[in-house]
Structure formats: structure tokens, C-alpha cells
Image (cartoon, rainbow, N blue to C red):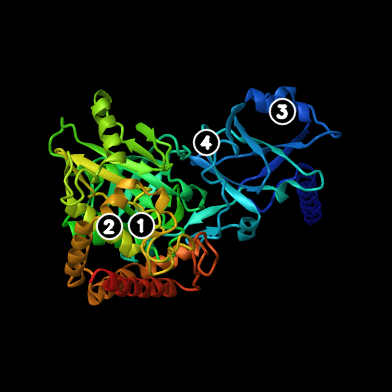
Amino acid sequence: MIRRVKKILFICATLLSIYILVNNKIDPNTQYSILLVNNISIEDGNNFINNEYLNLETIKESKNDSIFALIKIDVNKKSIFKNLMIKDGYPFFVFQNNHLIYNNKENTYYKGSEKINKEYYYSNSELWKSQVLHQIPLHSEDPLYILIQKNKNKGVSDFISSPNIIKKTIDNLILTKIPVIKINTHNNSLDTSTYTFTSTKIITKKNDQLILSKMKIRGNTSLSFPKKQFNIIFDEKNKLNDLVLKKNVLISSYSDKSLLRNKIAIDLFSSFRNKNIASQYVHLIINNLYEGVYLITEHPEQQFRKQITDTISSDFLIQIDRGPFDGYLLNNKNGYKIEFINDSILNNKHDKIYNFEQYILNHLFEDNQRNISTKYKINIDSFIDYIILNELSKNIDAYRLSTYLSFINNKVSMDIIWDFDLSFGLANYNGGFNYEGFIIESEIKGYIPEFWHTLWNSKIIQEKLSERYQELRKNILSNKSINNYIENLYKEIKVSAVKNFEKWEILGQDIWPNKYNFKSYKEEVNYLQDWIIKRLNYLDSKWN
């Protein structure tokens, strides 16, 4: 009798579970239950969205014109964010405690498609093929209500899920020899306009250090890439090897599949100028998601400030670029723009800055081409080294974009180096892939500020270029030195590169603006190394 009662109770419990599952649309594949509360009318859904307030008491189920589903998701009391996978292209709005806390139109950092990442385990990896990850900041332990446009013929689990994401140990990253930077944004989204305060842990084989920081997404063209670049400002008391952690940039090198071009340019120019422009490869983790291998290096403003000894001086930094900017901005006939990096001191020196800008545009190096003398002192050697590096790398952005002139102690210098993503034979336009020819004489010469042409066309400068190049060719730029340097860089990061390309599966893929797309990381490095040697041989014939 007792066995019969137990059997009946078991059958009833099973039937009840099936009834709940079918009628309430609980997704059995997720970590927590996803419950379809109601189908909402277009009018009610739009009211909740426009008012940014969800009134559960006024909800009436609509079966006729419904395009909205209202979904309830329980949260883990110990969590600070909730992972939601939403079918790509489905608008949705998240409410907690009746208030709108997240919507996919305004929160974009994890809006882009994420690839399956071997640094994590997923409860259902198939979701990543059609859905997009959003990390929802939690304001309390109350459940989330998601208002989402739905297809009447699809079930809830077809367009929303809450996957269980478990991060593997980072020990395997540390074993790759480069540090790990682990960042927590404290539930805040990263954007391009303002800095977000973050906590940062820097992990090396020797120790860990926790640092307060602030961070934002940066870039122009790179904003369109799924692997973002970041500005990050640390407490300046901290250091990462030789890198003083003040205002720095995390360079993604998404289009540069060798991961080496910026590092090579920075190190070469540091050697040319006998300066220490610090840079370091790191693994980057943001909110427990692995972002790949990055190069952290000094922001141009940080490079500039390192050269200033007088805190109340009238020194300033000039940026030639495409804009937009936050400082003084002036247009000119070539279409490029000049910015004077904004500073409280500079606000009172507008006339001086404006006059200097006009002089740069119209008269720099023109006063006396034979002697290359001007009304301002000029560090000619810095201009020579800058030209050699940009022509050696055939940097298609040289002279006209991401170009910085420093004015320190009444002397103009080119001691700041920046942005070599599209250099060393990478670009498929403006002849960037061709190891012959000069960028300053290429099809973009009309967009290069005139003072560069004045400098280039000077016989004195050409003699100095030839003399300096031959000097560098004996040591820093010798074939042996270049080959050894690149081979050592490759050995340093080749294991880390494997992790990067597990995250970003782009080897062999057509990524703008690559001229060639090699199937392996080693092939990318080999092409770069061969191109540089061919380029040096070409320059030997010109600067002999």
C-alpha cells in the first residue's frame, strides 16, 4: 500500500513538473529559471519603455497584438552582475525594482558578438553562435524583468538565456611569461566619452598588486573593431616593470595579426632617441572575460609630461590629426586639423599658441631653407629620426595623423611616437604594402602639412637623413640586429599569441586593411620580418 502511494505521488510530482515547464516556459538549459510572465501589448510595452518604469500591477496579458514578452529571471544573491545571452538583433529592456536599469540601445560594450573562448567553460556553447552576451549590473537581490520583442512562433529559450559562465584559472595565462591585467568595472559600462572608475589587479609570476584606476574606450577607426582599445589611468605610485602606471593606452593590435608593429616602432624610436618609451605585453581580462593580448604603453600626453621639468612652464603639445578634439582646434587648407592639448595653463596663452600654429602651417623651415633656421629653435635631429622611422615602416598615417610636436623650453621637437598599426607592409592602400617608394612622395602627399615637404625637399636635410640612416644601419638597423630583435619578440609572446587567437579567430581571415592574410601566426611574423629587411635594402639604395 505504501509503495503504491509513493508511486502515485512520484507520478503526480512528475506531471506537475511537466505542467509547470510547459505552461510557464522555464528554460531547463540555464543556471536560473527564466519564466515567461506575460505577453504584453504594444501600447503597454512602449509605455513601460518610455517611462522607464515597470508597473506589474497594471499589466494585462495581450494575445492579439502582442510583440513584447515579459520575462522574469531570478538572480544569485552573491552576484554583482547577471549574464544574459540575447538573440542578435532583438531589442530588450531590463527592469529591477520596477526601474529600467539596462537596455541594449545605450549599453554597447558587450553588445558585439563574442566568440567561443577556451579560457571559459559555458553551459551551452551553441548559444554563442546566434546570441550576444550582455552583462547586466545588479542593484539588489530582487529578480530581473526583461521586456523583449519576440517572434510569436518562437519560444523564450530561442531568443534569451542566462548561461553559466565559469572562468578557468588564470595560471595558464601567467605561464605565458607576460603579466595579466584583470579589470573590474563595478557594474558600469565602458564608453568612449567619459572615464569609468575601475579596480585593476596586475598579476605576474612574482606578485599581485591591486590598483585603483579609471578607463574608457578609445580610438577612431579601431572603434569599429570588436577588440577595443582603451585609455587607462592608474594611481601613479604603481609600476609594471619599467612602465610607470599613469596615463597609458591598451593597444589591441586587432588588424595587426603579428601583434608586433607598434612594439617595434616604439622600441626602435626609443633606441634612436636614447629615450625610454615604456611598453609591455599583457593579457587583458575585463569583468572575468578574456579580451586577448594587448600592448600597454605610455599615452602621448604621458610621453610629453615626462620631458617637462618645470611644472609652471609654458610648454605645450601639438597634435595633428583628423579630430574631434577637446583642445584648441584650427582647420587649414589641407583638410587636417591641429589640436593643442588642453590644459588650464594653456587657456591663458591662446594668442601665443595661435601664432605658433599659424607659423607651423605657413613658415616652419621656410625662413631659410639653406640653413634650416627659423624664429623658433628646432631639434632637427628629432625630425630626422622621426622621418627615418616613418619611412622605414612606410607608415601610411605618417606626418598627417596621430602626429605630435612638442614645444619645450622654446624648442620644437618630434620626440613622441604614436600609432603604427598600419605600418611595416600591412596596409592594402596608399602603397603601404610595397617595400619601395616613400610615403611623403605617395598619393597622399597632398594631405601632408606643407612644412614636411619643405623639410623633405631641403638638400641639407637629405644629407642629414642619409648620414643618420647609415649610422643607424651599422647597429640598431643592421640586418642581424633587426632579425635577432624580432625573433626574440616572437619567442616572448608566441604562446600568448595562441591564447589571443583562440579568443579572436582571425588568422587567415580578411581583416581590413591587411594586404595579405596568413593562416598561421608564424607566417604573419615571417612576412613582417622579411618585409623589413627588403625595406632596409631599398633604403640602402636611396640613402647611400
Give the mark nearest the N terminus, 1 or 4. Answer: 4
Q: Is residue 13 left or right of residue 201?
A: right
Q: Are circles 2 and 1 on residues that touch, CB within 8 Å? A: yes
Identity of the residue furthest to the right in this view: 64
Residue underneath mark 4: 138
* Amino acid at circle 2: Ile
Residue at position x 28%, y 75% from top? 483
Mark 3 and mark 2: span between their CA atoms?
Answer: 58 Å
Mark 1 and mark 3: span between their CA atoms?
Answer: 56 Å
Q: Indicate the quadrant containing the C terminus: top left, top right, bottom left or bottom right.
A: bottom left
Specify whether residue 544 is in view: yes
Give the mark nearest the N terminus, 3 or 4. Answer: 3
* Rendering coords of residue 229 (x, y %): 42, 49
Mark 4 and mark 2: span between their CA atoms?
Answer: 52 Å
* Label 1 residue SS: helix
Disc 3 or disc 2, which is closer to the eye? 2
* Amino acid at circle 4: Leu
Give the mark nearest the N terminus, 1 or 3. Answer: 3
Q: Is residue 201 left or right of residue 127?
A: left
**Quadrant position of residue 470:** bottom left
Disc 1 or disc 4, which is closer to the eye? 1
Mark 1 and mark 4: span between their CA atoms?
Answer: 53 Å
Instruction: Determine crowd level at label 3: few under 14, some 14-19, many 20+ residues with C-alpha closer than 10 A.
Output: some
**Quadrant position of residue 151:** top right
Give the mark nearest the N terminus, 2 or 1. Answer: 2
* Amino acid at circle 1: Ile
Instruction: Determine crowd level at label 2: few under 14, some 14-19, many 20+ residues with C-alpha closer than 10 A.
Output: many
Residue underneath mark 1: 440
* Label 2 residue SS: helix
Residue at position x 60%, y 60% from top? 125
Residue underneath mark 2: 387
Residue underneath mark 3: 46
